[in-house]
Image (cartoon, rainbow, N blue to C red):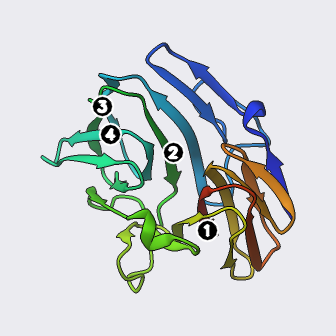
């Protein structure tokens, strides 16, 4: 079953410096039908104005993945980590026992990100942070694993959850197939373009909540970039 969540029906807010859309209940947006999708708790679509961002704030016991769509995000945290993650690349923060961080757009143009939160396998784990480039050419025409809780997922950023985050870049007319193990769920959002997933159309920013499917055929109807989270 695939359920479409159109971008224009998502929750969200405009804060001047931040234009945000929420696929699931978050902050002042509450929908009892959209609390989470399996262990996927948050998927926010954020547009951050130049020279602004999220000042220092704290998290604990959550896996937080940031997929940069446009521009760049600059991270700093209480562990001493600093880094700048550019469009197409990914950063992962395992909040564990607690971490304080800031995320700023220090660029001269808007930055657009997906911020994805996944519930971890266990609480009280040590906090960590990491960032990695994922050239779009390396995932042209097929899915690449960006972050995973499976230590055998070569090249992926590690997370402390039974989940994986994957992405694909497709030209108009291309198809990519993703195999979903029985009993698992997926949530897919086109970062740009337009795709059909097993025949269901999704425009850029729309969400597709997927369960009871084991083979996903993603067909691009325009040059597209898609991000998918696979969870229990």
Element under disc 4: strand
Mark 2 against mark 1, which lies toward the viewer? Answer: 2
What residue is shown at x 30% (from left), y 25% (from top)?
Answer: 108
Q: CB under 8 Å between callouts 2 and 3?
A: no
Q: Extreme top residue here?
A: 16
Task: Where is residue 109? Give x, y as percent.
Answer: 37, 27
Q: CB under 8 Å between callouts 4 and 3?
A: yes
Residue toward you, 85 or 158: 85
Query: Where is residue 70, by image quadrant?
Result: top left
Mark toward the start of the polypeptide (3 vs 1): 3
Disc 4 crowd rating (10 Å Cα; few below 14, some 14-19, many 20+) is: many
Disc 3 crowd rating (10 Å Cα; few below 14, some 14-19, many 20+) is: many
Mark toward the start of the polypeptide (4 vs 3): 4
Using the numbered discs, state the Cα–Cα distance from disc 3 to disc 1 in whole angstroms: 28 Å
Mark toward the start of the polypeptide (4 vs 2): 4
Looking at the rendered image, the quarter that the C terminus falls into is bottom right
Task: Where is residue 221? Give x, y as percent.
Answer: 75, 58
What residue is shown at x 25% (from left), y 41% (from top)?
Answer: 75
């Amino acid at each position: 079953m695939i359920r479409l969540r159109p971008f224009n029906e998502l929750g969200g807010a405009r804060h001047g410096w931040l234009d945000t859309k929420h696929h699931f209940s978050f902050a002042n947006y509450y929908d009892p039908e959209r609390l989470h999708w399996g262990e996927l708790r948050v998927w926010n679509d954020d547009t951050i104005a130049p020279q602004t961002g999220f000042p220092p704030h704290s998290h604990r016991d959550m896996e937080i993945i940031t997929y940069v769509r446009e521009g760049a995000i600059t991270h700093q945290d209480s562990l001493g980590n600093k880094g700048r993650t550019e469009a197409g690349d990914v950063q992962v923060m395992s909040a564990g026992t607690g971490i304080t961080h800031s995320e700023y757009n220090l660029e001269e143009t808007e930055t657009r990100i997906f911020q994805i939160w996944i519930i971890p396998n266990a609480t009280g784990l040590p906090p960590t942070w990491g960032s990695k480039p994922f050239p779009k050419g390396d995932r042209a025409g097929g899915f690449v694993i960006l972050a995973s809780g499976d230590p055998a997922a070569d090249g992926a950023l590690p997370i402390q959850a039974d989940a994986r985050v994957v992405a694909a870049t497709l030209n108009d007319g291309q198809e990519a197939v993703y195999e979903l193990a029985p009993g698992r769920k997926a949530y897919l959002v086109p970062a740009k373009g337009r795709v059909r997933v097993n025949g269901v159309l999704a425009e850029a920013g729309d969400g597709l909540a997927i369960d009871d499917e084991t083979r996903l055929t993603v067909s691009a109807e325009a040059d597209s970039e898609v991000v998918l989270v696979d969870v229990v």
